[in-house]
Image (cartoon, grey):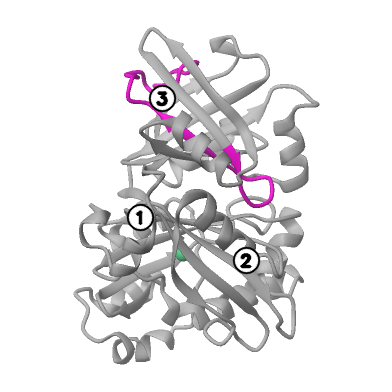
């Protein structure tokens, strides 16, 4: 659906590695059982699959939740001294794996390795009575990895080794549809290293770039480049901090995550007012821009279909580009450390990322940093 009307820049990407979409995101968390409850209760995810003691797995436990095309895997260790536990000790809760759905996970791995990727996992076939799945993996920024998933010969609920998880507790979905983009924060001076990685290793093209003239307030500056695969289904913006008067939100992230990692996951909805109302009712906290933002927003973006009153009430932001407009809002960080957060986005033609909102948004983030004493 997203690939139907792509701007010309996408054609520049060489699709030697066809990617079908995001397969799942795996978060290493300190308490997977409670995290699953949070994502179901607050974000409207549905129970899907489980692996752990009850499936004969004594090392770690995973709960898989889904909403339309989004699948989150929440994983915790069941004992000390595991690589999962070490990851959590260093980074806190966060995204470890961005799994990408491919036709051929062996081919994707070989192509990536030939082009200079560092291996995370050699191609491996796992089977059960529902068929088999091939997975392979490469490293990206920090300790984050991409896993290629080939599931054309599999009919099971999620992956071999998982069983259906169908508890009675099942809060309603809130209309989240798919992962629109996923943003990584990397260290100062490293953005272009990772831009080149996505170009060389995965055949992505850079579709947008922002520098500190676009994205700066009195205190904070950052630079960002958006990388996309050829069909536009996978978009990975990459941020690095730029010099500001005080500590930027990217530096705050890097300090608390103790290295590069996933900053935010943007999830799409067809009705942002309904979705954000439900999220707020369920206790999700959002960044707020000053009410004065709405005094001038229509002068900036022109006509929009939505009434301004509910947008203002909920704190939803609006931006426009050549092709249409978008509505977006950002949650506060969703774990103890001020690291990962979510963006809720509704696209009405626009394919950009909300550049016109950056200033108002960063000022809102700085107010939060001030409260945390990290500005
Ligand atoms: Fe975003």
> Looking at the image, do the residues carrying marks 3 and 1 touch, with CB atoms under 8 Å apart?
no
Few, some or many residues within 10 Å of mark 2 (<14, 14–19, 20+): many
Q: Depth check: 345 or 207 in front? A: 207
Query: Element under label 2?
Result: helix
Q: Is residue 159 above or below residue 128?
A: below
Residue 123: which disc?
A: none
Queried whether the magenta region covers residue 148, the answer comes back as yes
Residue 230: which disc?
A: 1
Few, some or many residues within 10 Å of mark 3 (<14, 14–19, 20+): some
Q: Is residue 293 above or below residue 224?
A: below
Real-space Cα separation, disc 2 to disc 3, in angstroms: 34 Å
Is residue 37 among the parts visible in the rendering?
A: no
Q: Nearer the viewer's eye, disc 1 or disc 2? A: 1
Q: Is residue 69 above or below residue 82?
A: below
Residue linked to disc 2: 191
Query: Element under label 3?
Result: loop
User: Which residues are the magenta region?
Assistant: 138-166
x and y percentages locating residue 326 in the rendered image: 31, 71
x and y percentages locating residue 105 in the rendered image: 45, 31
x and y percentages locating residue 66 in the rendered image: 39, 36
Which comes sooner in the sequence, label 2 or label 3? 3
Q: Is 374 on the left or on the right of 46, as rendered?
A: right
Query: Element under label 1?
Result: loop
Which comes sooner in the sequence, label 3 or label 1? 3
> Looking at the image, do the residues carrying marks 1 and 2 touch, with CB atoms under 8 Å apart?
no
Queried whether the magenta region covers residue 319, the answer comes back as no
């Amino acid at each position: 659906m997203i690939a139907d009307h792509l701007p010309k820049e996408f054609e520049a990407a060489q699709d030697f590695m066809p990617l079908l979409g995001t397969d799942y995101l795996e978060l290493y968390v300190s308490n997977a059982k409670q995290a699953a409850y949070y994502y179901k209760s607050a974000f409207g995810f549905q129970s899907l699959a489980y692996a752990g003691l009850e499936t004969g797995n004594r090392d770690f436990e995973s709960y898989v939740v889904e909403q339309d095309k989004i699948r989150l895997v929440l994983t915790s260790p069941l004992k000390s001294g595991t690589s999962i536990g070490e990851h959590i000790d260093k980074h806190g809760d966060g995204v470890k794996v961005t799994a990408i759905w491919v036709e051929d996970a062996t081919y994707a791995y070989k192509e990536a390795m030939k082009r200079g990727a560092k291996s995370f996992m050699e191609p491996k076939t796992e089977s059960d009575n529902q068929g088999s799945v091939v997975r392979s993996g490469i490293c990206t920024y920090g300790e984050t990895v991409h896993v290629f998933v080939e599931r054309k010969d599999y009919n099971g609920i999620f992956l071999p080794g998982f069983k259906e998880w169908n508890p009675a507790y099942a809060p309603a979905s809130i209309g989240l549809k798919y992962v629109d983009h996923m943003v990584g924060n990397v260290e100062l001076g490293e953005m272009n290293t990772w831009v080149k990685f996505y170009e060389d290793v995965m055949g992505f093209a850079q579709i947008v770039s922002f520098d500190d003239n676009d994205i700066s307030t009195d205190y904070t500056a950052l630079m960002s480049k958006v990388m996309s695969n050829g069909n536009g289904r996978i978009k990975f913006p990459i941020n690095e901090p730029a010099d500001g008067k005080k500590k930027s939100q990217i530096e705050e992230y890097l300090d608390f995550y103790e290295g590069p990692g996933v900053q935010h996951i943007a999830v799409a909805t067809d009705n942002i007012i309904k979705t954000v109302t439900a999220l707020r009712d369920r206790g999700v906290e959002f960044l707020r821009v000053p009410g004065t933002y709405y005094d001038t927003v229509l002068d900036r973006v022109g006509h929009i279909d939505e009434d301004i009153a509910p947008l203002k009430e909920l704190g939803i932001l609006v931006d426009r580009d050549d092709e249409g407009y978008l509505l977006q809002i950002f949650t506060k960080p969703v774990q103890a450390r001020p690291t990962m957060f979510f963006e809720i986005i509704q696209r009405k033609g626009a394919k950009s990322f909300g550049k016109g909102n950056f200033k108002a948004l960063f000022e809102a983030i700085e107010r939060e940093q001030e409260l945390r004493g990290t500005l």
